[in-house]
């Protein structure tokens, strides 16, 4: 091995110098001179290595023995590192070129919040300057409270959408942040004004149409009710058609009512109306109402806590009512429907559980979509509007809660609203 050969050479040089020194009567001095010569040689070799490492890329200097092997290995690893560095640099340049071509704004920041890189598309969105703002602290340049709170929160599970003031009109920006590396973050900023305006137009259209249909539908229902008060005075061939018309008119009224309520939930902010809601009292009131409306339903309350929810009483009542009514409609007569209110860790759970027909797991991801029906014929028979769970999902989002659905065919379903414990 090279180090053994080097050690053997050193021993040999020392032995020879000692032998020669003994011939002249100076063995100690000869050994010291030999060792000093070896040290000087090694220092010279180290100086050559240092000059080579600090200089431009080139082959290592000629050397033999252990120094030749060391230089060869250093040169090999240096070449491998340079190749890896070149590959990494080409990858970074490829990503930067890709981000430059994007229409969305892209910003990379380090763990201290300083901008490492940004593309030109971010200029009109956040008011940054490309590339002059590189190295500046992002929160010092973007003076938007919502943005800075989101950026500093380190909770990026959901994107941020906020209103920014443009040159002529308001623009809506959507910000998504992805952490990577050792505290670095990658920001994507997109102008979603078009999508927001289209969604607002859709909501306005639904609300306006629903509102305009209420008056003629009320008139139709009124006349049908008048006709059906004295069915004995009507020709028998008209009784059943009129009853069917009245049933469908009522169903349409329920649909319009749900549409208007959902439009109101989506278009208005109710934070000023939030208060600590007594869920025990709300559930007891709901049980009394449902027991009167559905006399053959068995409503069971399981109230394990007095915890309150910070929110809007009407919205919460509407959400739980929709869950409970669905459970009643899709359960056999007399089958119990349990409404529970409990605390689990730092969460409050509101559960509506039934022993009804259940839902196939393939339908569960789409249950909260508007007008989605598991079975059209079954939904028509129960008089559902297809908007109940959409309302529940929206109320949950407004209150910072999550809707979880568990169900098995033939065994029943459990709908759970998970609220953050507060107050």
Image (spheres, grey):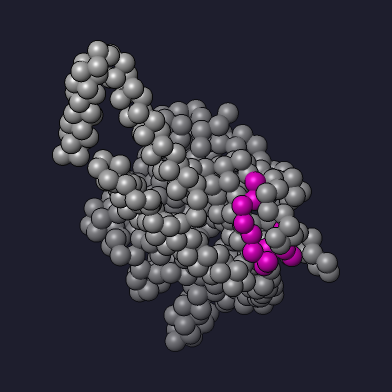
Q: Quadrant of the C terminus?
A: top right
Residue 89 seen in the figure: yes
What x and y, as percent, mark residue 250?
53, 69
Query: For residue 116: magenta?
Result: yes
Q: Nearer the viewer, residue 259 or 122?
A: 122
- The residue sitting at 55% across, 65% down in the picture is 96
Left or right side of 54 for 267: right
Q: Quadrant of residue 28?
A: top left
What x and y, as percent, mark residue 411?
24, 53
Q: Is residue 82 above or below residue 194?
A: above
- The residue sitting at 38% across, 52% down in the picture is 60
Residue 314 seen in the figure: no
What x and y, as percent, mark residue 340?
40, 38
Residue, far right: 168
Left or right side of 43 for 362: left
Q: Is residue 56 above or below residue 236?
A: above
Q: Quadrant of residue 44?
A: top left
What x and y, as percent, mark residue 218?
64, 72
Could you tell me how many numbered marks the image carries? 0
- The residue sitting at 83% across, 67% down in the picture is 167
Q: Nearer the viewer, residue 76 or 166?
A: 76
Q: Nearer the viewer, residue 84 or 374?
A: 84
Q: Nearer the viewer, residue 69 or 102?
A: 69
Q: Which residues are magenta?
A: 114-126
């Amino acid at each position: 091995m090279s180090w053994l050969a080097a050690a053997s050479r050193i021993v040999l040089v020392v032995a020879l110098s000692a032998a020669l020194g003994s011939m002249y009567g100076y063995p100690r001095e000869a050994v010291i001179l030999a060792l000093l010569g070896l040290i000087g040689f090694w220092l010279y070799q180290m100086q050559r290595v240092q000059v080579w490492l600090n200089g431009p890329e080139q082959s290592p200097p000629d050397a033999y023995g252990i120094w030749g092997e060391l230089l060869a290995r250093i040169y090999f690893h240096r070449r491998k590192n340079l190749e890896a560095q070149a590959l990494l640099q080409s990858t970074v340049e490829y990503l930067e070129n890709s981000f430059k071509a994007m229409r969305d704004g892209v910003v990379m920041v380090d763990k201290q919040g300083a901008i490492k890189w940004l593309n030109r598309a971010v200029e009109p969105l956040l008011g940054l300057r490309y590339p002059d703002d590189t190295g500046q602290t992002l929160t010092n340049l973007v003076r938007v409270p919502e943005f800075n709170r989101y950026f500093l929160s380190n909770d990026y599970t959901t994107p941020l959408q906020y209103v920014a003031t443009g040159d002529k009109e308001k623009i809506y920006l959507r910000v998504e942040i992805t952490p990577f590396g050792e505290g670095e973050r990658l920001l994507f900023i997109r102008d979603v004004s078009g999508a927001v305006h289209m969604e607002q137009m859709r909501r306005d259209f639904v609300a306006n149409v629903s509102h305009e249909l209420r008056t003629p539908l009320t008139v139709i229902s009124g006349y049908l009710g008048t006709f059906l008060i004295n069915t004995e005075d009507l020709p028998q061939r008209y009784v059943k058609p009129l009853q069917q018309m009245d049933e469908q008119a009522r169903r349409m009224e329920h649909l319009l009512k749900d549409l208007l309520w959902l439009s109101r939930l989506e278009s208005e902010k109710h934070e000023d109306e939030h208060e600590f809601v007594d869920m025990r009292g709300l559930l007891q009131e709901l049980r009394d109402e449902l027991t009167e409306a559905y006399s053959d339903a068995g409503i069971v309350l399981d109230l394990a806590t007095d915890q309150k929810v910070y929110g809007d009483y009407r919205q919460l009542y509407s959400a739980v009512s929709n869950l409970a009514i669905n459970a009643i409609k899709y359960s056999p007569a007399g089958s119990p429907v349990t409404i529970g209110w409990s605390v689990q860790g730092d969460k409050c759970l509101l559960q509506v559980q039934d022993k009804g027909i259940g839902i196939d797991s393939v339908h569960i991801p789409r249950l909260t979509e508007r007008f989605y029906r598991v079975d059209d014929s079954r939904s028509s028979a129960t008089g559902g509007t297809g908007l109940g769970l959409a309302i529940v999902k929206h109320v949950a989002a407004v209150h910072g809660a999550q809707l979880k659905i568990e169900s098995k065919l033939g065994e029943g379903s459990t709908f759970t609203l998970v609220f953050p414990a507060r107050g």
